[in-house]
Image (spheres, rainbow, N blue to C red):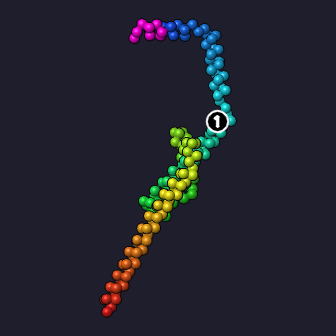
Amino acid sequence: MSQEQLDMIENENEETATISSEQAAFISQLESEEEQEDFNPAQEKLENEFDEQTAGMTAAMSLGTIEFALRRVVHPDFEFTESTKAYAVENLSPVLIKYGAIVPGWLSQYDAEIKAAMAVGKLASEGMDTAHKLKKADAEKAQAKKDEKERVRVAA
């Protein structure tokens, strides 16, 4: 460290050491008043309500995503009961708030785009399900024709 830097640190130490206890108390009082001015109970209440609503929506969206995935993997008719969904949203919301995992407010401006993407996903999923069902029905019809031909051949 250069002598100039050492002199600068020494001057800073001298400046802080020269503050009287009255000045320190005054500064502390100003800081306390500033903190109180920054605290707005009405604003905090609004923010808390907004966080609770956003956390509920985030939990519901996450639950919907899980349910959608389970429909694709487990069974097309899979669905959580309404009471299970409500219980999950109620108990997930506080954790989402606590860890800041709620959907950010700026995302709401993209609501239309998000809904459009979800609609496209649903169309693709349903299209695939319909294609599988149609192929299965075609295979069953082909098997039925084959079985009928076999019966006719055996009967003749």
Q: Nearer the viewer, residue 81 or 14?
A: 14
Q: What residue do we see at 42% from left, 59% from top?
A: 73
The span picked out in magenta is 1-9
Does 80 appear above or below 23?
Answer: below
Q: What residue do we see at 34% from left, 81% from top?
A: 146
Magenta stretch: residue 7 in it? yes
Find residue 4 and report its horizontal and vertical position in percent. 44, 8
Q: Nearer the viewer, residue 79 or 136?
A: 136
Find residue 140 and report its horizontal and vertical position in percent. 39, 76
Find residue 29 and report its horizontal and vertical position in percent. 65, 18
Furthest residue in direction right, as rendered = 42
Q: Quadrant of the C terminus?
A: bottom left
Disc 1 residue crowd, few under 14, some 14–19, many 20+, Cα 10 Å: few
Q: What residue do we see at 64% from left, 35% from top?
A: 44
Magenta stretch: residue 31 in it? no
Is residue 58 visible to the viewer in this orientation of the structure? yes
Q: What secondary structure is the magenta-colored segment mainly?
A: helix
Give SS at disc 1: helix
Q: How many marks?
A: 1
Q: What residue do we see at 64% from left, 28% from top?
A: 38
Does 36 appear above or below 89?
Answer: above
Find residue 134 and report its horizontal and vertical position in percent. 43, 71
118 vs 46, left or right, is left
Residue 43, image quadrant: top right
Furthest residue in direction bottom, as rendered = 156
Q: Quadrant of the N terminus?
A: top left
Query: Which residue is under mark 1?
Result: 44
Is residue 87 visible to the viewer in this orientation of the structure? no
Q: Nearer the viewer, residue 146 or 124?
A: 124
> Label 1 amino acid?
Glu
